[in-house]
Amino acid sequence: MTRGKLTLPEIGGQAEALKAAWEQLKKQEQWAQTFVGNAAYDEVVFIGSGSSYYQAQVMASTFKLWLGRSASALPSSDIFLFRDQSVARSRKVLLVGVSRSGESSEVILALDSVKDLPNWTTCGITCYEDSRLGRMTECLVSPLGKEQSTVMTKSFSSMTYMMQAAIALAAGGALPAEMESALELQGDIVERGRVFAENLVEANDFNKYIYLGMGAYFGLAQEVCLKLKEMSYVWTESYGTLEFRHGPKSVVEPGTLVCLLVSEQARSYELKVAEEMKAYGAFVLLVTTAKGDDTSFADAVFELGGGSLSDEARAVAYLPMLQYLGFYTAMKRGVDPDHPRNLTQVVKI
């Protein structure tokens, strides 16, 4: 069996998956108005498990900024096991289940646990319309998000993009056009990201991996951290960028890769952190819209473009190269990223 034969083309298929999600959303535009665009809810709670929880974090961050309403992201299990500690009683809540397969036990249990509560409404997003999630509540469906590999790559990107685009449609203004413009970035980023990541892995040997991000990019940092861990079995961690300075930076030394997902909103502050890590001996990788004099200290910079877009609209552009980084690290270590040990596509209790 050829290692990586499933994962590699799935990472490479993201541009097509995003375009398909956009076209599908046009058919489901009423979903956006009925659910995320409905101002009657006091709180919108996005839930998922593992990668889907990290998607939920990106979705909630985007929702709060673009719609100016209250939203949060929680692990699915918090809703059916610790609901009253997680969401204030007496609020009118929209619960949004996020699951690639639509079969994750925890998201199903969470939605089922609130079905008879008067102030709770459910909806979801998945890649499988005939899944249990797809049958039990109204869902957005990413048509090309379906994957054979265990780890989430194009499913994560396409579902995150699709929900952000739905939020953009609900918000109106220039945001839908921004989301459509973001599609134009992805094809080039996927191809350049593959070459960049392969060369970076080939030329370096790291013993620690740290991913940093803020705002919507915190969920992305957690996700790409998980991708490397799942695919290659190396130990890696993720933090909020400035929070990393408050204790965790003690682990930084030569041989440490510090990868920073640079926003434009907090660019100057984030780059100060990166410079500090460089001074401690880290190999600093920046993923950013464009190089500049302020990035010249870094060991490697991957440019995305899209500087005219908001950070949130550009979010999924950060994923392909860093997914490839996990893939090529696994290949270098002789690990099959298609079938990580101890993992399955669907986690059931």
Image (cartoon, helix red, strand yellow):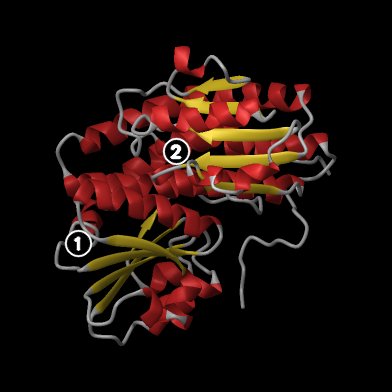
Question: Quick check: can you spot residue 143?
Answer: no
The quarter of the rendered structure image containing the C terminus is bottom right
Mark 2 nearby-residue class (10 Å; few <14, some 14–19, many ≥20): many
The quarter of the rendered structure image containing the N terminus is top right
SS for tag 1?
A: helix
Question: Could you tell me which residue is drawn at 33 percent across and 41 percent down?
Answer: 23
SS for tag 2?
A: helix
Q: Position of residue 173 (x, y in %)?
A: 14, 38
Q: Position of residue 314 (x, y in %)?
A: 38, 33
Q: Earlier in the sequence, mark 2 or mark 1?
A: 1
Question: Could you tell me which residue is drawn at 33 percent across and 46 percent down?
Answer: 164
Outermost residue, top direction?
A: 293
Above or below — where is 270 with respect to 140?
A: above
Residue that carries the numbered disc 1 in the rendered image: 34
| Left or right of residue 208: residue 146 | left
Mark 1 nearby-residue class (10 Å; few <14, some 14–19, many ≥20): few
Q: Position of residue 126 (x, y in %)?
A: 44, 58
Q: Is residue 266 or residue 340 the one in the foreground?
A: 266
Above or below — where is 101 with respect to 173?
A: below
Q: Which mark is residue 237?
A: none
Residue that carries the numbered disc 2 in the rendered image: 316
Q: Amino acid at mark 1?
A: Thr
Above or below — where is 72 with respect to 158?
A: below
Question: Quick check: can you spot residue 24?
Answer: yes
Question: Could you tell me which residue is drawn at 63 percent across and 20 percent down?
Answer: 299
| Left or right of residue 195: residue 269 | left
Outermost residue, bottom direction?
A: 116
| Left or right of residue 119: residue 113 | right
- Report, in whole angstroms, how far the alpha carbon at label 2 lies from the one at label 1: 25 Å
